[in-house]
Image (spheres, rainbow, N blue to C red):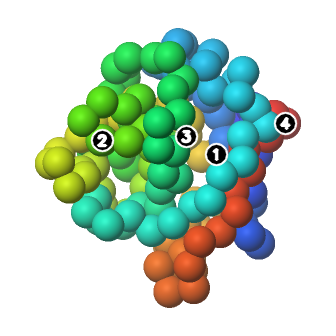
Amino acid sequence: MSDLVIRAGDFRFDARFEEKLAPKTVAAFRKAMPFESQMIHVRWSGEAVWLPLGDHQFGVDYENHTSYPAPGQVILYPGGISETEILLAYGGVRFASKMGQLAGNHFITLTSGLDRLTELGKTVLWKGALKVVFEAK
């Protein structure tokens, strides 16, 4: 079942919220939808794209957190020793910043378009930032 659509440039992905695993993160993010930002390639984490959000606060703490999101998993780092951010893994990831290893809340999982994830990552890596929109389905 898909709860939302994620659009970045010409890419479109259906996704589901991880309601049972990260209920507070999901609730906070739903309040911010539709959510728009810029997607850029990660610097330290491996094969992922991220949305740097600076001091933006969702008012959540850690839940269902991981440093190793699988391809198609979206995590929210709620801030602390590094800026608030959202990360979408498209390959191997060890979530980190210049401060060291981090953990983020896995709160969204892609349900379609997984075959285009590597293309998305390489497009952002070689061509630059893409506008991204998270919308309810």
User: Which quarter of the figure has residue 42?
Assistant: bottom left
Q: Secondary structure at mark 4?
A: loop
Which residue corresponds to mark 1?
Answer: 111
> Which residue in the rendered view is the most extreme toward the bottom?
126
**How dense is the environment of label 1, judged by Cα within 10 Å: few (below 14), some, or many (20 and up)?**
some
**How dense is the environment of label 3, judged by Cα within 10 Å: few (below 14), some, or many (20 and up)?**
many
The amino acid type, in three-letter code, at marker 3 is Thr
Look at the numbered discs 1 and 3 and tell me whether their residues touch, using CB distance below 8 Å. yes
Q: CA distance from mark 2 to mark 4?
A: 31 Å
Q: Look at 79% across and 37% down and name the residue there.
A: 34
Residue 134's tag is: none
Q: Measured from the top left, where is residue 115 in percent x and y?
A: 58, 67
Q: Is residue 100 above or below residue 48?
A: above
Which residue corresponds to mark 3?
Answer: 109
In this rendering, the label closer to the viewer, 4 or 1:
4
User: Which quarter of the figure has residue 79?
Assistant: top left
Look at the numbered discs 4 and 1 and tell me whether their residues touch, using CB distance below 8 Å. no
Q: CA distance from mark 1 to mark 3?
A: 6 Å
The amino acid type, in three-letter code, at marker 2 is Ser
Which residue corresponds to mark 2?
Answer: 82
- Figure quadrant of the N terminus: top right
From the viewer's perspective, is 91 left or right of 32? left
- Figure quadrant of the C terminus: top right
Which residue corresponds to mark 4?
Answer: 137
Q: Look at 47% across and 61% down and name the residue there.
A: 49
The amino acid type, in three-letter code, at marker 4 is Lys
Q: Measured from the top left, where is residue 84 in percent x and y?
A: 43, 38
Task: Confirm whether residue 69 shows in the render.
Answer: yes
Q: Secondary structure at mark 1?
A: loop
